[in-house]
C-alpha cells in the first residue's frame, strides 16, 4: 500500500462514494461510523475512488470511534492506497472534537486526510431517497513542538486544516 505525502490542496470525491459513506453513517446511527477512503494523488490534490467501512470497535461507540484492528491491518496488507480516515459525529457538527485531535497521532504518520460526516438534520427522511450528509475534509498537518527540556528532542504535534471538498 502506498502512502501519499505532499501538498494536497483539494479532495475530490465522486457522488456515488459520498452516498456510500452516507448510507454507512445512517445505518450505524446512533453510533459513530468509521472507515477509510482509498484513492490516488493527482496534480491538484487527492482523488478518492472508494470507501471501505470498518467496524467501530470503541468501548463507547455512541461517542467515540476505534477502527477494528483486524480490518485495519488487512487493509494495510492489501494493495489499496488508503488516503484518509472517515468517521461521523451522529449528534454534532462535522468539526474536529477534542477527542479527534487527541487521537491524531494514531493516524498522522500514515495518512494525510481526515473526513468527518454528520447527519443533515435539515432534511426529513421523506425529502429524498438518499438522506444527505454534512461532510468536511481536513488535511493532517505535522509540526514540531519545542520541548521544555533541552535534553529531549522536539516531539511532533498534529493539527487539522480544513481543505476544499469537491463532490463530482
Image (cartoon, rainbow, N blue to C red):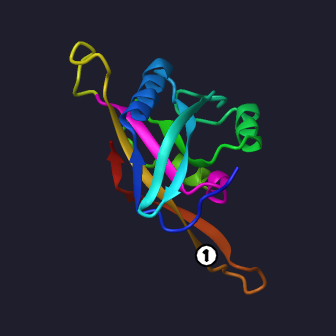
Span colored in magenta: 105-120
Q: Position of residue 53 (x, y in %)?
A: 57, 30
Label 1: how many residues lie within 10 Å, few (<14), some (14-19) or many (20+)? few
Residue closest to the far top: 126
Place residue 155 in its image quadrant: bottom right
Q: Position of residue 64 (x, y in %)?
A: 56, 35
Residue closest to the far front: 43
Q: Is 107 covered by the magenta stretch?
A: yes
Q: Position of residue 55 (x, y in %)?
A: 63, 27
Q: Position of residue 80 (x, y in %)?
A: 66, 43
Residue tagged by mark 1? 144
Quadrant where the C terminus lies?
A: top left
Above or below, comparing residue 33 to residue 143 in the picture? above
Above or below, comparing residue 111 to residue 18 in the picture? below
Residue closest to the far bottom: 150
Q: Residue at x 38, y 46 (%)?
A: 136
Q: Is residue 92 left or right of residue 104?
A: left
Place residue 4 in its image quadrant: bottom right
Label 1: state its secondary structure. strand
Q: Residue at x 23, y 12 (%)?
A: 126
Q: Residue at x 24, y 18 (%)?
A: 128
- What is the number of callouts on the image? 1
Can the viewer see residue 23 in this picture?
A: yes
Q: Is 134 covered by the magenta stretch?
A: no
Amino acid at each position: 500500500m502506498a502512502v501519499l505525502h505532499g501538498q494536497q490542496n483539494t479532495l475530490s470525491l465522486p457522488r456515488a462514494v459520498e452516498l456510500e459513506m452516507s448510507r454507512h453513517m445512517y445505518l450505524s446511527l446512533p453510533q459513530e461510523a468509521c472507515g477509510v477512503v482509498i484513492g490516488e494523488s493527482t496534480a491538484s490534490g487527492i482523488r478518492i475512488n472508494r470507501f471501505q467501512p470498518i467496524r467501530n470497535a470503541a468501548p463507547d461507540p455512541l461517542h467515540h470511534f476505534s477502527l477494528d484492528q483486524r480490518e485495519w491491518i488487512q487493509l494495510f496488507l492489501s494493495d489499496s492506497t488508503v488516503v484518509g480516515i472517515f468517521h461521523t459525529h451522529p449528534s454534532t457538527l462535522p468539526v474536529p472534537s477534542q477527542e479527534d485531535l487527541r487521537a491524531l497521532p494514531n493516524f498522522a504518520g500514515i495518512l494525510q486526510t481526515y473526513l468527518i460526516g454528520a447527519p443533515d438534520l435539515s432534511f426529513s427522511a421523506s425529502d429524498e431517497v438518499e438522506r444527505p450528509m454534512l461532510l468536511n475534509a481536513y488535511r493532517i498537518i505535522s509540526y514540531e513542538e519545542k520541548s521544555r527540556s533541552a535534553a529531549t528532542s522536539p516531539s511532533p504535534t498534529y493539527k487539522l486544516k480544513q481543505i476544499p471538498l469537491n463532490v463530482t
